[in-house]
Image: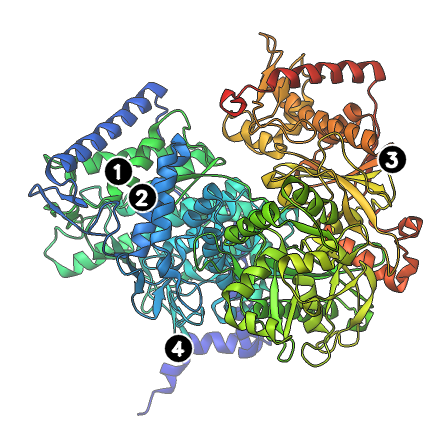
Amino acid sequence: MNFSVNLLRINPAVKASAAFRRRGISIRHLAFVFAFSIALLTLYYNYLRHTAVPFPADVIHYSQETPEVWEARALQVKNAFLHAYHGYERFAFPKDELCPVSNGSIDNFNGWGVTANTRVPFFETVIRYLGGLLSAYAMTGDDILRTRADQLGTILAPAFNTSSGFPSFSVDTVRGTSNGPKFGGLAEIASYQMEYAYLGKITGKKEHIDRFTAATHNFYNAELRKYGGMYPMHWDLSSGQATDAHLSVGAASDSAHEYTLKQYLMTARQDTANLEMYLRFTSHVLNNLMFISPNRHLLYVTDSNLYRGDIRYTHSFEHLSCFLPGLLALGVHTLPLNHLEDVGLNFTELADDLLPEHKMGYEELASFNLADLHLWAAEGLAQTCYLTYADQPTGLGPDTITMRSGGLYPKIPWMEAMQEWKIKGRRGPPPGVGDKHPWAGDGNNTTDMLDREISINRRDYYIRDSQYQLRPETVESLYILYRVTGDVKWRHRGWAIFQAIEREAKTPSGYANVKMVDTYHPEQRDVMPSYFLAETLKYLYLLFREEDIVPLDKWVFNTEAHPLPVFEWTKEEKEASVRFIIFDQYANIVSQHQQEFPQYYPNPGWHEHDPEEIQQVSEACIAHTCEKLEEAGWAKESVKVIGITNQRETTIAWSRTTGKPLCKAIVWTDSRTKNIVAHFEHVLATTGLEVEFGQFKRGDEGVEALRDITGLKLSTYFSAIKLRWMIDNHSEVQKAHDEDNLLFGTLESWVVYNLTGGAHGGIHVGEVTNASRTLLLNLHKLTWDDRLLRFFGFRRSILPKLVSSSEVYGHLSHGPLKGVPIGGLVGDQQGALVGNKCLRQGEAKCTYGTGAFLLFCTGKDIVKSGHGLLSTVESILRYYALVLTNISKVAYQPGPGADPVYALEGSIGVAGSAIKWLRDSMGFIKSASEINTLAASVPDTGGVYFVTAFSGLLAPYWDPGAAGLLIGLSSYTTPAHIARATMEANAFQTRAILESMKLDSSTELKYLKVDGGMTNGDVCMEMLADIGGFDVVRPDMRESTALGSALLAGSALRLFGWDILKPTTLAQVNTKGSRTFNPQMPEEDRERGWTAWLRAVERSKGWDEGVDD
C-alpha cells in the first residue's frame, strides 16, 4: 500500500521524531527516561508514599457495659445451660445425647455412661469421661471421683498395647483387648496426655505417667524434618512415625497441637519437650499455613499436603481451627516468648534439623517481637472466626468455608504481608488484624449469577458446609483473648453469638444444630452434641462473668473444656531416662543428651524395665552427646574418663554365658515381693539369723541382727528380696542359679558389664553404695556377708566383685568413646552429696523440692542417731518412712581399700509444696516465684509462725499425728506475713534437723550447700542463713548428682589434679555464679524466733486423734 509523502510529513509522530533528532535525543534516550520514571513511581508507591495504609481497618466502637450488665448476661447463659440440661434429663437420660427437635435420645459418641462394659472409642472416652472425672476431683477433692478415674484409666489401658505406645482407636472393656486400624489420626493418638498425666499425679501410679510420656517421647523423636517440625495428620501405630504429609490444625489434628502447650503449662512448665514442639508447630503455621484474603484481608489458617513433590494448599478454613487464636493468646500470656533463653531455649536453634527453607522462616519470625507476632495472629484469626458468624443472616457460623485464594485469585502468605508492612514503616494495623465490619452483601438472595459471583468475591469466601454445629472453638478463643487482653470487643462479639444461638438454635427442650445458616430460611437439625453443654456454654459463661473463676495461670482446659489444675512433678514421679553429660574441669556443661526409656507394668503393683533397652538408650545417649560435642568444636578424644550414677535397688539377672537378661529388671518401686518378705520375716521369727556358727538370733533379736549387719530391715525395696522372687518364679533364672550360670547386679553393674564387652570380656562389678541397698552387704566390713547369702539361699558366685566409688574398673569396648576408662560409680543420692563437694565432716547439703532432703557428712565414723535421724541417702525411707534406723550408711568410698565416708540423713515432708498450697489453695500468688516478692514486702512475719505439718512431721520430730498450724494471727496479719512465715518454716525445720545432726555427730556444721527449685529466690536463702545461723552456699550449676559421679571418676585418674581425699583440689569446681549467703540477724533475735518456733511445733503435735489412738 502506498502513502502520500505529504501525509507522512504531517504525521505528529514523525514531526516529534525529527524534532528529537535535531536536539540530539535518540530512541535510546527516550527508553531510558521511560524506564527511570517507572522505577521512581515504583519506589514512591512502595517505599516513600506515607499517605495510604496498605491494610486499612474499620473504626468500630464498643460500648463499655457495666459489670452488672455482664453478670446478667452470664446468668442468661446459665439459664440456657439449665434449659438444655433439664431437657436432656427429661427426654434423654441416661442416653448420650438429646434429640432436641423430636425430644428423642441417641447414643452418639460412646453408647454407654460411666460403666465400661463394651467396645468404646478411646479418644472420646478419655476427653469426656476421664477428663470430667479428673476435673471434678480437682475441684471437690472427693476421693470417689479419683477412684473412678483410676478405674476408668486402667480399663482403657489395653489401648496402649501397640508397638509404639500410641493408643488404638477403641477398647473392648469386657475382653480387655484393643481394636482398630493399624494407623491413627493425630488428634486421637495424642489427646490423652493431659488426662493421664494428672491421673498419674493424683494416684501416684507410674503406669499412668508412662502412658503419656510415651506420646511425648514418640512425637519428640519423630522424623519431622520435611514437615517443618509440625505433626502430620496420620501415624503408624507400630513404628510411631507419620505416614502422610497432610498438615492441618483442623479436624483430626486440632487437639494434638493444643496439648503441646497445655501439657507444658499443666506440669508447671517442667516439660520442655512439649514447649519445643509447641514452638515448632506454631512457627510452621505462622510461616506456611496462614494467609490473608485478597479483598477484606481476612486472616485465616488452612491445611497443606504434598503432591508429587509440590505443596498444595486447600485454602479451606474450618470452624475447628478456631481454637488456634485462643491457644496463641494463651501462649502469649504464659510464655516468655521474647526471652526463651530464660527457659533454656534458643528460638532459631529449634530449626537446626529442618530444611533450609524452614530455617529461613525462623529467621524471619525472629526479626519480629515474637510475643507481638503471636498476639497479632491470635487477634486476626479470632476476628475472622467471628466474622464467619456475623457475615451470615442468621448470625451463626458455617462449619467450613473456602477462601478465594490461589488459582485465579491472589495468594497472600501472611508473613510475606507482614514483611511488606514492616518495610513500609508499620503504618496502620498489621495485615489481617485491624477491626472489620461484617460483610454487608447478600450472595444468596439474588437470582443473577454474575451479581452473586461479584457479591461473594467481595466477601472473599465460599461456604462449603453451611451447618452450624453448636461448636465451642470460636467462643473459646474469644474467652481467652478477653482474659489475656482485657479488650471488651471480644465480649461483645461473644454476646452477639449467644444472641444468635438463642434466636436460631433454641427449641422447647434444648438447642439444635442449624443448617443453611447463610440464608434467611435456616433449618434446625435434630442434634444437640454433648460438647455444647460441656464447652460452648461454659466458655460463654466464663466470658461474661466479672470474676475470673478459672484463672488461666492456675488451671488448664482439656480439649473438652474440663479444667485441670497446674501441678509439679517430683523427680521420683516422672524420671525414667538416661542422661549423659560432659563437664569440663570447672563443672561447666560442655555437651549433654537425655533420652527416656519405656516402663512396664504387667500386673498391679509390678514395675519393670527391659535391661537391654536401658543399655541401648545409654549407648545412644553417649553417641548423641559426642556428636553435639564435636559440633561445639571439641574432639571426642577430649573425654578422659566416665562416671555412672543410678537409682539403686533395681535388680537384674543375666546369663554368664550369653550376657543376655533372663527376665525383665524389677524396679525399686515394685511391690510384688510382699510374700517373699513375709516368708523371711517368718524365718527370722522362728529359725532366726545365724550370726555365728550354730548361733541363731530369732524374733526381735533377729531383726536387730539383720539391721546391725546391713543397716536395713526386710522390705520389698531391697535387691535380695527381688532376686529371690526371680529365682522362685522364673524357671530360666532358677536354672541359671542351679547351674552356676547366673550373674546378679544392680543398674551400675549391668551398664558397666555391657560397656566393657558384655559376654565377651565384660567386667562384673558392684559399687559399695549400691551394694548397701541389697541386704547382702556387711556395712562394717564392706564385704558380701556369707551369713546373709545362706539366709537368702544364694550362691556367692552370682555376686559382682565389690569395688569402691572411685577407681578405674575397666574401659569402654566399643562406640565413639572406645578405650575411655570408667572411673566412678555411685548411687544417685550419694552422688548428689559428692557433687555438692560435701566431703568432710561437718559439711552438709540440702535439696529443696516438694519436700527437702538433707545429708550431713560425718566422716569415717558410723554415727548412731539418738535424735530421730535416718541413715544416709535413703530416698525410699524419705518418702515412705518405713523404718527408723540408728546406723549411718556409706556415703561413698573414695578408692580401693580407702576408709568409707558416712553421713546422716534427715528430711522435711513439706517444703516447696507449701508454696504450691499458697498459690493453688489460698490464691496468695499466681506463680511460685512471686512468693519472694510478696515475702520481701514486709520486714518480718508480724509474729506469725507456720508449722507446715500437712502430713505429720518427719525428722527430727517423727510425729505422724502432727497437723499444720498457723499461729500468731491478728488483724494486722496480711498475706505477705503468711508468705514470709511459710518460707521461714523451711528454715526452722532445716535448723532443727541440723541441730540434731550436730548433737549426734559432735560436729559443728561448716556450711550448708543447697539446690532445688526453692533455692532460686534470694529472700528464701537469706532467711535460711539468718534463722540457721550458718553460711548457705548456692551453686549456679545444680546437676549435682551427675557431677558427683564425674568428680569420683576424675579423681580416679587425678584428672585436673582432682583428689576426693583432698577436697582442696576441687576448689575451682562449680564456683561460677556460686553465691554465699551469710547470717545477718542478731543472735538475740535468732534465738527468740527459734524458741517461738519450738513452742509452735509443740502445739501442732498429736493433733490427729485417730493417729494418736
Taking the view exactly as shown, the residue that stands out farthest to the top is 971
Could you say which disc has been placed on residue 10 in the image? 4
Q: Secondary structure at mark 4?
A: helix
Looking at this view, is 679 or 259 the one in front? 679
Taking the view exactly as shown, the residue that stands out farthest to the left is 102
Q: Earlier in the sequence, mark 3 or mark 4?
A: 4
Q: Earlier in the sequence, mark 2 or mark 4?
A: 4
Marks 2 and 4, Cα distance to the nearest angstrom? 66 Å
Which residue carries the number 2 mark? Answer: 386
Residue 174 drawn at (x, y percent): 26, 57
Amino acid type of the residue tagged 1 in the rendering: Ile
x 81%, y 59%: residue: 804
Marks 1 and 2, Cα distance to the nearest angstrom? 8 Å
What is the image's colouring?
rainbow
Q: Secondary structure at mark 3?
A: loop
Which residue carries the number 3 mark? Answer: 1006
Above or below: residue 569 compared with residue 578: above
Badge 3 vs badge 2, beta-carbon distance below 8 Å: no
Left or right of residue 509: residue 371: right
Badge 3 vs badge 1, beta-carbon distance below 8 Å: no
Q: How many residues crowd around disc 1 within 10 Å: few (fewer than 14), some, or many (20 or more)?
A: many
Looking at this view, is 251 or 328 the one in front? 251
Badge 1 vs badge 2, beta-carbon distance below 8 Å: yes
